[in-house]
Amino acid sequence: MVVVGGITRLTHSGLSMSNYKLISGTIPPTNDVEWQEAFELYKQYPEYQKLNSHFTLQDFKDIYFWEWLHRVIGRLIGIVFLIPFVYFLITKQLSRATIKKSVILMFMGGFQGFLGWYMVKSGLVDNPDVSHYRLAAHLTTAFLTFAYTFWVALDLMFPQKKEINTKFRNLVRFGLAVLLIQIIYGAFVAGLDAGFIHNHWPLMSEGKFMHPTVYIEQDPLYKNFIEGKSGVQFVHRILAYIVVVFVFLIWIKSKKLSVSKDQLKGLKALNFVVILQFILGVFTILLQVPVWLGVAHQVGAFFLLSAMTFTLHRFSK
């Protein structure tokens, strides 16, 4: 889902399905007449009228495929969750705590689907692009839904309790919070297409740590760092360094603790993935966001969140 979602965004396919049909939308157009009808519907909206008026039917089919696949996988995730949940509920194989967690997951999954529709809706009015705020909400909720799913699974895999070093646990919690802010800014960069500018590293432009446009794209000043392309990319760059520092700080502080094998695995995974993700980010900027690398960078964030979630869980219970 993360991979297909990334491809959908990077190929600008998200507005190709202009209407939302929960059940019948699962089946794509199956003949020339249905494809032409879908294409004619697409022509009524700003993306075609302002950006893609040169599109042929084949061009439309190419972007339609990714958005359709993204939505179908979303429905599939719901089925994969709901059918086993009902079965285990009826056969009384779930504890009260697990039922409560599963209901929360069900709500999060449903809310994620709503945010997907809400995001697409923002690009069907006047501006042929989705709101980067709504994109960030959609992406971040997806990551949080996964993280909580993983947490529930870890509760079942490691039911035993253990002593907790609260100071170290709080350090990992703070690292997780910073990582989530970085994920939000990654979504801002994607939503604003901010990765296609300032394609230098380690400096933002030749000879300059901060590009001059960071401060002047938006007014008032603070908007440059949440709505300006240069400002958002600058924040995303700085947060990348901060995330790396936090991960290495977690590693250093863990040396003073007596850690178990699974805790050590989490710490090692965290260090490996954060370095890999940083490298992917650098090359994504330098190469001006090729689709495969942009998707790899998004998947890297997914695995970094996984490693952070696992580490926090193993030092929390």
Image (cartoon, rainbow, N blue to C red):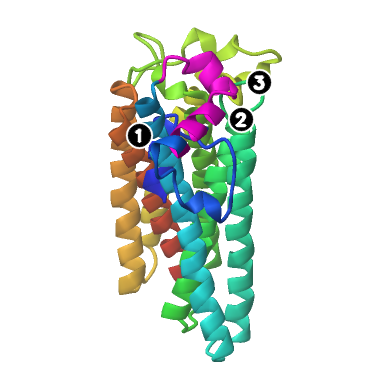
Q: Would residue 103 appear left or right of 314 to someone viewing this image?
A: right
Residue 46 position by quadrant: top right
Total numbered circles: 3
Residue 294 is labelled as 1
In the rendered image, the vertical position of residue 217 relative to residue 170, given as above or below:
above
Q: Which residue is depicted at the point 30% across and 43% down?
A: 275
Say what secondary structure mark 1 lies in. helix
- The amino acid marked with disc number 3 is Asp
Q: Earlier in the sequence, mark 1 or mark 2?
A: 2
Q: Which residue is depicted at the point 33% across and 71% down?
A: 262
Q: Main secondary structure of the magenta part?
A: helix
In the rendered image, the vertical position of residue 279 relative to residue 192, given as above or below:
below
Measure the C-alpha gap from mark 1 to mark 3. 27 Å
Residue 126 is labelled as 3
Measure the C-alpha gap from mark 2 to mark 3. 11 Å
Residue 17 location in percent, x, y? 52, 37
The residue indicated by pointer 2 is 131
Q: Which residue is depicted at the point 35% across and 45% down?
A: 300
Say what secondary structure mark 3 lies in. loop
